[in-house]
Image: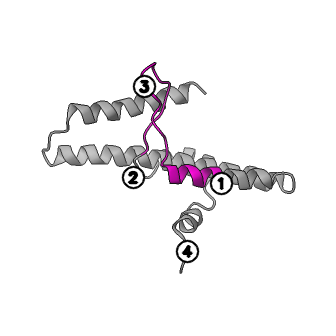
Amino acid sequence: MNDKPEEREEKRNEGLTTSALADAGQTEARSNVPPAGAATAEEQPAQLFSPDDTRTFRSRWDEIQVGFVDEPRRCVEQADNLVAMAIKRLAEGFAEERAKLEGQWDRGDNVSTEDLRIALRRYRSFFNRLLSM
């Protein structure tokens, strides 16, 4: 199997829907998604996805949107799948970041106040973005 990583991820997420994510009640944990939100004057919103993830999601969206005229129902299903994948990736990012912090705590390492401040800032940023929609 010589699939590209993006193709493997797409196959793994085939059939994923926002409804399925909501029904699951929880998502898999493993991500480093920096939360974003309403920024103060001196604070920019944290990026939610890596540049590669952002490019991949935007490219998929463009493909979906182009196909709408010919297959509107299929495109809406694909859009739902893409949104579900983005939500899943977002949850994985937060879980990965939290796991790193918890790993340090479990080893008895001190996590710097600065690391915790950055983590809390990402959560605040993301939370404010959610509420502003």
The reply to whether the magenta stretch includes residue 48 is yes
Given the current orientation, which residue lies at the most extreme left position?
108
Circle 2 SS class: loop
Given the current orientation, which residue lies at the most extreme top position?
41
Q: Earlier in the sequence, mark 4 or mark 2?
A: 4
Q: How busy is the neighbourhood of tag 2: few (under 14 within 10 Å), some, or many (20 plus)?
A: some
Separation of marks 1 and 4 at Cα, in angstroms: 18 Å
Q: Earlier in the sequence, mark 3 or mark 4?
A: 4
Most prominent secondary structure in the magenta stretch? Answer: loop
Q: Report which residue position mark 3 lands on.
A: 43
Q: Earlier in the sequence, mark 1 or mark 4?
A: 4
Q: Report which residue position mark 1 lands on.
A: 59
Where residue 21 sits: x, y (%)? 55, 48
Where residue 67 sits: x, y (%)? 80, 55
Residue at screen point 44% across, 52% down: 28
Q: Earlier in the sequence, mark 2 or mark 1?
A: 2
Residue at screen point 18% across, 47% down: 106
Q: Earlier in the sequence, mark 3 or mark 2?
A: 2
Separation of marks 4 and 2 at Cα, in angstroms: 22 Å
Q: How busy is the neighbourhood of tag 4: few (under 14 within 10 Å), some, or many (20 plus)?
A: few
Residue stretch in magenta: 33-60
Q: How busy is the neighbourhood of tag 1: few (under 14 within 10 Å), some, or many (20 plus)?
A: few
Closest to the camera, between mark 4 and mark 2, is: 4
Q: The residue under label 4 is which amino acid type?
A: Asp
Left or right, 38 with reference to 114: right
Separation of marks 3 and 1 at Cα, in angstroms: 28 Å
